[in-house]
Image (cartoon, helix red, strand yellow):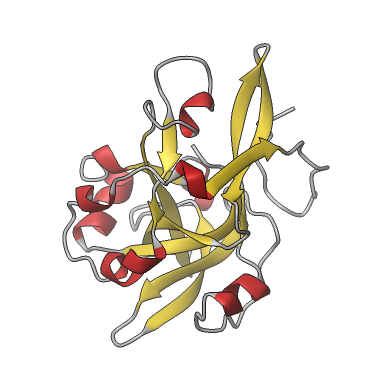
Amino acid sequence: MCANFKPLTLLQLQQLRLPQIDFAYTEEVYPMGSCPLLFQAEQQMEWREVMFGLVPKWATDLSVAKHTYNARQETILQKPSFQASALKYKFGVIPVTEFYESKYIENKPQRWGVRRKDGNAFFIAALYEIAKVDQQIIRSASMLTMDAIDHPMMKVFHEPGNVKRSVIVIPQQRLHEWLNWKSPNIQNFVEGFPVDEFTCLHVPKEKLVKSSPQLNMFE
């Protein structure tokens, strides 16, 4: 699962020639934090500031986002939190510089970062929703994940065992196809990212920022 990541930078935004982002966001995001989401509006791609952790329309408070920041692609049509969004094709991407996973060394979790070798941002597939909670409009999103038991890089992360997951990375050349996809069946996009284009390294967690809601997962 991915519970922590760094969104794209202004320089990366310019390099990708994407529309400008007109709101501020933090350099590092945890569940219930805000981040930029790119989606397809009627005629063009647009940005929205969203909460990391999907808040379904039936939610009565925002705490559900602590458990919905990742959505297994295999079960989005069965899970009440994600079903409505998937059936309405609410697909977007969260562009990131780096995302973090736990790697167990001597039975202790270490935080490792996964990034592109060329330093460019990349697009993680997302499912988004707009809900109203306590008279407040909440825009939120979840990263879509896939089985990674056979992925050369991602299979070494997470707790020891047979459950290995990876975010779904949308290649830049398929970005428009994904953002305009009109089917709840997304199997066509479920593919492990190319290992030769990515690298991973140990990134010890920095001190927590009190004003930012975070999950204390790593040593």
Residue at 33% x, 53% y is: 58
Whether 5 is drawn above or below 135: the answer is: above
Q: Residue 50: x, y in percent?
A: 51, 65
Residue at 32% x, 65% y is: 174
User: Quick check: 182 left or right of 143?
Assistant: left
Is residue 135 in view from this perspective?
Answer: no
Q: Residue 38: x, y in percent?
A: 44, 71
**Quick one: which residue is furthest to the top in this view?**
106
In which image quadrant can residue 124 be found?
Answer: bottom left
Residue at 32% x, 45% y is: 191
Whether 60 is drawn above or below 7: the answer is: above
User: Quick check: 211 left or right of 49?
Assistant: right
Q: Residue 90: x, y in percent?
A: 30, 64
Is residue 90 in view from this perspective?
Answer: yes
Q: How many marks?
A: 0
Residue at 43% x, 27% y is: 164
